[in-house]
């Protein structure tokens, strides 16, 4: 191993990260400086805190509590580690090994150097001192045998970094294909979002106490409480058993065994984790070698090269269709943009937020044990589908040109009227918004079973919301555009003012859609006062709201088109600027 | 004689740097104009300003007799020009045929015309076998060919091409050169930038040379040939002819 090369590689990694931050402007530089100081402070505090906690705080706790403390630390580390992994996947490979192979280093050398350089991460810098401090503190506070936690923790980190490196290498090889790359980034990000929501779902499904439901007699409630307690005990038993079979938990399991005076499980855990780490590295190296020699990363035998089939020029394309009553240019742009969005993983990711919300709300409502929703609240619950629908579309709606990147250059070059461009962009978002809205509506309809009048009113509220938010979205897209990196939802090189607009838009959003709840609220009030039936008021006011939104949209489209024309070169500069 | 491109005092500053400095271009319609210059001389900045991708800091521009300062006239003139910009202008998630269809519709061409021209263009550029491929999966050369096809699709009167042959294979390059020649023979104008002097020498009827943002030479190719080769003229114009051969210390030992 050449230390000078390792040093150069670590410097390169640091420099790339630093340049990326510093290019974001002075505010970004200040933020990065604060983050670095904070990171170092956290590392020092983690080390010292871990030591003091182990020495003084955990000296006399039960082995089970000690295990849970280590579980928490492992969970924290894995969470930070996963966030880092997802972020790096969303960037282009930070140090691609193919960029180093022309240098005077062997493949094995590049592999080792790159693996060592992959340890240069904030999560490791913060949590390694904490783990080491905790191990040493426990050694002083409890017994000298606890020192075995130190090699066990290092073996744990070795396993995680080795298998992460293996996974990253495998994904990087698969991602040589651009289309597959974006699908992988989307899949990993989505899996991560779902994983982060698992505790929420689990608490909704399994851990929600059944005793919340009212109406039962005391004996029945006592029985239910006993059942819940048994279920909790079963879950804890399962969790403890998992420490024997799930490798990342061998660390906390080892800590418990050491606290109980058993050295064997800790030693076995260290050996097992070290073995698994070595296995991960070996696998990573073999797949790297296969990739270098031209094999398929999945290990499959490559198929012989296919002779391209004769060109077919058949079926009609989606972009060839005409949209009735819509100007030709707006229709063409709407269909091309829709086609493009249907394939863009970043758009799918933005829409996947709806799936997550759908899942959480759906499961939450299905698992409710507190009886029927009050009749008065039903129209509001139904109207909330409109709010939830737009929540997932906000990022696209308020930054319509940022997803185009180089494609926006085509829009500037084309001889289309700019209000046609805005109209086309808005129309292209209508189908996904409608699909999401209808899915929510069906779900809510099945759960709440509202009368048809309420459903019709919500449909009108959706139209009003879409038109109103399109106006706001057009304005925000023109005034505060930001480039979204291909295949991710990550904004790049965002100015502080744009960030402010983004944050404000997210914060103000619930208030801007408040008028959509007015028809339901006034309907409930009128019925309460005995003046008019709620459904009739709700429907009439929703229709008026829709009309008002349509008038507002029509009146603002041309002025916003002119504003777009004036600002299109500035927008182009922002959305086509790439970062390393 | 009608002028296809006319600029007066065209200037673009980036902070302290004057990337294009008081450029006065006069290009007659029906000419094949080669716009040359060393790296960073201001070629792409000029094309960006002429095509509306970048606003000039000062000066005026007229294309095909229409003033670009007026937004309505600028939009109308865009119907009559085709552009292959430096960093292309493709939508990553569309196939070649979808992209050409989209461009054709934005130029308000009839559906049948778009279909026929797209088929011919894709065949000419050898992109017809890649119907399912998205633009993001294309190599740089293929992307360039697609951008060229899109620029030719509306049959423009004036074509701006920024390094059109860079990364394009020899076969397509040959086909493209022949197409452009026929294009000019029909009375259209081509404004082309390239670093390959041989291509410019073979194709162009007129050349302009820009260095450090200023137009240092504008003449016909016939005039250039009278005095020697284009390379000599270019080196003389940009000041490369007198430059001493730089020596590397470790090669001299």
Image (cartoon, coloured by chain):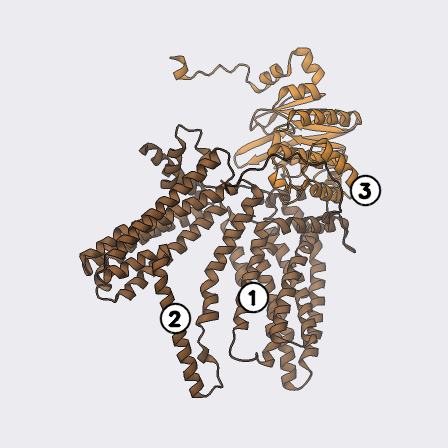
Chain colours: A brown, B orange
**Tag 3 near tag 2, CB within 8 Å:** no
**Tag 1 near tag 2, CB within 8 Å:** no
Q: Which mark is residue A469?
A: none
Would you say A489 lies left or right of A555 here?
Answer: left
Question: Dot 1: within a 10 Å radius of its alpha carbon, few (fewer than 14), some, or many (20 or more) residues?
Answer: few
x then y, percent, for residue A337: 67, 49
Q: What chain does badge 3 belong to?
A: B
Q: What chain does badge 2 belong to?
A: A
Under circle 2, the secondary element is helix
In the image, is residue B114 above or below residue A360? above
Q: Is residue A108 visible?
A: yes
Q: CA distance from mark 1 to mark 2?
A: 41 Å
Residue at 43% across, 33% down = A100
Q: Residue furthest front?
A: A301
Would you say A86 lies left or right of A398 here?
Answer: left
Q: Which residue is mark 3?
A: B112
Sequence-wise first label, 1 or 2: 2
Q: Which residue is mark 1?
A: A510
Residue at 52% across, 75% down = A368
x then y, percent, for residue B100: 72, 40
On the same chain, marks 3 and 1? The answer is: no
């Amino acid at each position: 191993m050449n230390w000078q090369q390792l040093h150069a590689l670590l410097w390169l990694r640091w420099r790339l990260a630093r340049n990326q931050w510093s290019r974001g402007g002075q505010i970004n530089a200040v933020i990065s400086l604060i983050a670095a100081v904070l990171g170092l402070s956290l590392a020092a505090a983690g080390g010292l805190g871990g030591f003091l906690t182990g020495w003084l705080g955990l000296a006399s706790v039960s082995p089970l509590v000690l295990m849970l403390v280590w579980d928490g630390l492992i969970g924290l580390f894995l969470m930070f580690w996963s966030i880092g992994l997802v972020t790096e996947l969303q960037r282009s490979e930070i140090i691609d090994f193919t960029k180093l192979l022309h240098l005077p280093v062997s493949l094995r050398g590049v592999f080792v150097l790159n693996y060592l350089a992959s340890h240069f991460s904030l999560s490791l810098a913060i949590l390694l001192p904490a783990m080491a401090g905790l191990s040493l503190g426990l050694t002083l506070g409890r017994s000298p045998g606890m020192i075995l936690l130190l090699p066990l923790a290092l073996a744990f980190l070795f396993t995680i970094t080795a298998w992460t490196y293996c996974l990253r290498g495998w994904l990087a090889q698969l991602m040589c294909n651009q289309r597959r790359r974006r699908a992988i980034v989307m899949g990993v990000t989505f899996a991560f979002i779902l994983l982060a929501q698992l505790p929420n779902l689990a608490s909704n499904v399994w851990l929600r106490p059944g005793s919340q439901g009212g109406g039962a007699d005391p004996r029945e409630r006592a029985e239910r409480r006993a059942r819940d307690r048994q279920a909790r005990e079963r879950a804890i038993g399962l969790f403890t058993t998992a420490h024997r079979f799930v490798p990342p938990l061998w660390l906390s399991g080892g800590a418990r065994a050491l606290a109980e005076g058993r050295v064997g499980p800790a030693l076995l855990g260290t050996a097992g984790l070290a073995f698994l780490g070595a296995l991960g590295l070996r696998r990573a190296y073999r797949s790297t070698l296969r990739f270098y020699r031209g094999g398929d990363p999945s290990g499959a035998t490559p198929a012989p090269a296919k002779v391209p089939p004769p060109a077919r020029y058949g079926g009609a394309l989606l972009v060839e269709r005409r949209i009735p009553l819509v100007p030709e240019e707006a229709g063409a742009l709407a269909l091309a943009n829709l086609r493009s969005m249907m394939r863009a993983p970043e758009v799918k990711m933005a829409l996947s937020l709806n799936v997550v919300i759908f899942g959480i709300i759906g499961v939450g409502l299905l698992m409710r044990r507190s009886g029927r929703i009050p009749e008065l609240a039903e129209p509001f619950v139904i109207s909330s589908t409109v709010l939830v629908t737009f929540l997932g579309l906000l990022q696209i709606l308020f930054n319509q040109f940022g997803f185009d990147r180089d494609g926006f250059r085509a829009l500037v070059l084309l001889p289309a009227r700019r209000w046609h461009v805005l109209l086309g962009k808005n129309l292209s978002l209508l189908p996904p918004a409608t699909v999401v809205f209808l899915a929510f509506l069906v779900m809510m309809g099945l759960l709440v079973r509202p009368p048809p009048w309420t459903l019709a009113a919500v449909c009108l509220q959706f139209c009003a919301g879409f038109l109103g938010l399109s106006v706001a979205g057009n304005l925000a897209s023109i005034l505060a555009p930001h480039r979204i990196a291909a295949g991710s939802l990550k904004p790049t090189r965002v100015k502080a003012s744009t960030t402010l607009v983004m944050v404000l838009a997210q914060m103000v959003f619930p208030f801007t859609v408040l008028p959509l709840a007015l028809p339901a609220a006034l309907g409930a009030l009128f019925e309460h006062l005995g003046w008019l039936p709620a459904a009739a008021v709700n429907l009439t006011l929703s229709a008026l709201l829709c009309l008002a939104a349509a008038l507002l949209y029509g009146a603002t489209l041309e002025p916003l088109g002119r504003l777009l024309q004036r600002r299109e070169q500035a927008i182009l500069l922002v959305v086509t600027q790439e970062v390393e | 004689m009608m002028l296809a491109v006319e600029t007066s005092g065209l200037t673009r500053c980036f902070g302290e740097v004057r990337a294009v400095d008081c450029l006065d271009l006069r290009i007659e319609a029906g000419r094949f104009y080669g716009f040359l210059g060393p790296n960073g001389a201001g070629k792409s900045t000029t094309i960006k300003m002429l095509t509306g991708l970048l606003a000039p800091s000062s000066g005026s521009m007229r294309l095909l007799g229409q003033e670009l300062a007026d937004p309505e006239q600028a939009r109308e003139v865009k119907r009559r020009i085709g552009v292959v910009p430096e960093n292309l202008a493709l939508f990553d998630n569309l196939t070649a045929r979808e992209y050409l269809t989209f461009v054709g519709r934005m130029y308000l061409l009839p559906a049948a015309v778009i279909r026929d021209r797209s088929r011919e263009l894709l065949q000419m550029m050898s992109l017809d076998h890649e119907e399912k491929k998205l633009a993001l999966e294309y190599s740089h050369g293929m992307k360039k060919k697609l951008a060229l096809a899109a620029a030719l699709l509306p049959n423009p009167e004036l074509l701006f091409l920024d390094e059109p042959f860079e990364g394009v294979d020899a076969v397509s390059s040959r086909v493209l050169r022949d197409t452009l020649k026929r294009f000019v023979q029909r009375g259209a104008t081509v404004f082309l930038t390239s670093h390959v002097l041989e291509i410019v020498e073979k194709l162009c009827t007129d050349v302009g040379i820009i260095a450090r943002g200023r137009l240092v030479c504008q003449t016909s190719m016939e005039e250039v040939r009278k005095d020697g080769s284009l390379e000599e003229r270019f080196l003389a114009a940009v000041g490369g002819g007198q430059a001493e051969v730089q020596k590397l210390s470790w090669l001299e030992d």
